[in-house]
Image: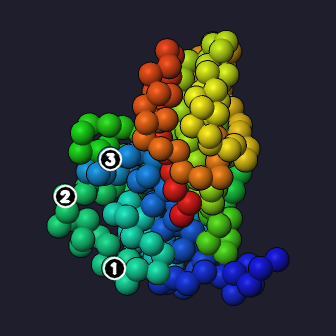
Amino acid sequence: MGVFDVVGPVMIGPSSSHTAGAARIGLMAREILKDEPKKAVITVYGSFAKTYKGHGTDRALVAGLLGFSADDVRLRTSFAIAADQGLAIEFHRSDEEVDHPNTVRIAMTGASGRKMEVLGVSLGGGKIEIREINGAEVALNGEEHTLITVHRDQPGIIAQATTVLAIGHINVSNMRVFRSAKNETAVMIVCTDSPVPNEIVHMIQNITAIESVVTLLPL
């Protein structure tokens, strides 16, 4: 256990789970979108739904979507900044039972029209996990260099992608593949020891059946 597991992260707001974690979820959602968000429909569940205004969860989520970290003083005025930047925000509370009390779903539309939906949970101490991307089950904590592909589930796709990474001398620390059903949409999450260069990303994007590729830096 490290010191941040005891005292929590440096942050603005009263709660590492409800504020710092929420800001990190919003920030990771923005990174996954890979576009400037212009609309976000945010649905909060469990304890997030009960206390999101009092603990600043709503402002933290919006701050993350704007690209602000948990310790950025602009978190306090994130709604006003979002309005100035043309980011439309819509909040909903849900009574639906979820696996984790600090759960949020964010459906985003970017400036280019790109759409993305993520479901994330705040685990405490500022730690988070993204558990769904566009309805596909995933497990993503944002603590490593990460490459994410969305592709059609068919033989050879994973082998081709990892071969390209090997060509680029990118060392893989771990990899997981999630799919909605056989021969349907699959999501591959590859954590690496170093950033994946743009030329390698483009080579992977050109693999038949891969629909999109996103790279993430550690948050």
N-term-proximal mark, 2 vs 1: 1
Residue at 74% across, 78% down: 5
Q: CA distance from mark 2 to mark 1?
A: 16 Å
- Seen from the viewer's position, the closer of residues 146 and 185 is 146
Pointer 3 residue: 35
Vertical relation: 186 (above or below) 173: above
Q: CA distance from mark 1 to mark 3?
A: 21 Å
Residue at 29% across, 70% down: 79
Q: Which mark is residue 158?
A: none
Residue kind at label 3, given as amino acid type: Asp
N-term-proximal mark, 2 vs 3: 3
Pointer 1 residue: 74
42 to the left or right of 111: right
Residue 60: x %, y % from top left: 44, 71
Q: Can residue 103 be seen from the camera position used here? A: no
Question: Which circle, 2 or 3, is nearer the viewer?
Answer: 3
Would you call the spot at circle 1 few (<14 residues within 10 Å), some (14-19), or many (20 or more)? some
Vertical relation: 27 (above or below) 193: below
Residue 98: x %, y % from top left: 66, 50
Q: CA distance from mark 2 to mark 3?
A: 14 Å
Pointer 2 residue: 86
Q: Secondary structure at mark 2?
A: loop
